[in-house]
Image (spheres, grey):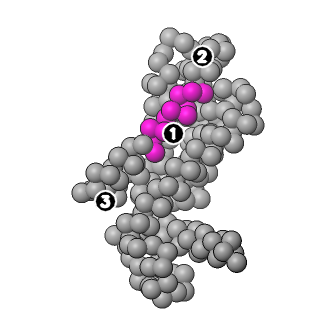
Amino acid sequence: MVKREKLNTEIRQEQIIKAAMNLIARRGLKGLSMTALANRIGLVPSAIYRHFKSKNDIVDMILDFIRERLLTNIRITCKETSDPMERLQRILRRHVETLRENRAIPRIIFTEDVFSGNPKRKTKVYRIINGYLQGLNQIIRDGQKMGEIRSDIDSKTVALMFLGMIQPGVILWFLSDGKFDISKESERNWNVFREAISAN
């Protein structure tokens, strides 16, 4: 019985998080409220408060979701292939797909509204990005040891370049309401990036 209640709670929390991300994608963080969220799910606001004490708790849970999704992309890819270049390309594709499926992510990670006046959350966002960079950095270092990736450039710099390859396209995709083809652009960027870092 306890297990079932826990499962029901987890399912409801996941439903709330997804609805919250949809609201943020459409209206920004300022458009997220307990009332709007309850209306979107078809609940009364008090039902939301049973799972989350405040809007801030929901935002923190969304950040946890983003962190887990990004790190899962790396873990899954590393299990699929041992080739460093192939890993990076697959992570790039998964990263883009994650953004396409969750349009709220850019609005959450790259808007000051999320962490303004909240140093702990600012640190949390930093750690999410830094943790992702560390995962990329390890793949790049492995590639350098294997002779696949140039060893004359710093692995951390390459990891930052990898993220830099995505962000401008994300901005254009977001500003164009999805009309900018971020998938096609990321593939073109990848070809240039691969040539720049390849040791072969």
Q: Which residues are magenta?
A: 128-139
Q: Main secondary structure of the magenta part?
A: helix
Three-letter code, disc 2 = Gln
Q: Can you identify the residue that label 2 sits on?
A: 144
* Residue drawn at (37%, 66%) of the image: 56
Give the camera-side residue of 128 and 149: 128
**Residue 132, numbered label:** 1
Relative to 89, residue 31 above or below = below
> Among all residues in the image, which is located at the extreme right?
80
Q: Quadrant of residue 34?
A: bottom left
Real-space Cα distance between discs 2 and 1?
19 Å
Give the camera-side residue of 87 and 49: 49
Where is residue 24 drawn, in percent x and y?
A: 44, 67
Real-space Cα distance between discs 1 and 3?
22 Å
Determine the secondary structure under disc 3.
helix
Q: First in sequence: mark 1 or mark 3?
A: 3
Q: Can you identify the residue that label 3 sits on?
A: 113
**Residue 93, numbered label:** none
Determine the secondary structure under disc 1.
helix
* Residue drawn at (62%, 40%) of the image: 74
Where is residue 108 drawn, in percent x and y?
A: 41, 57
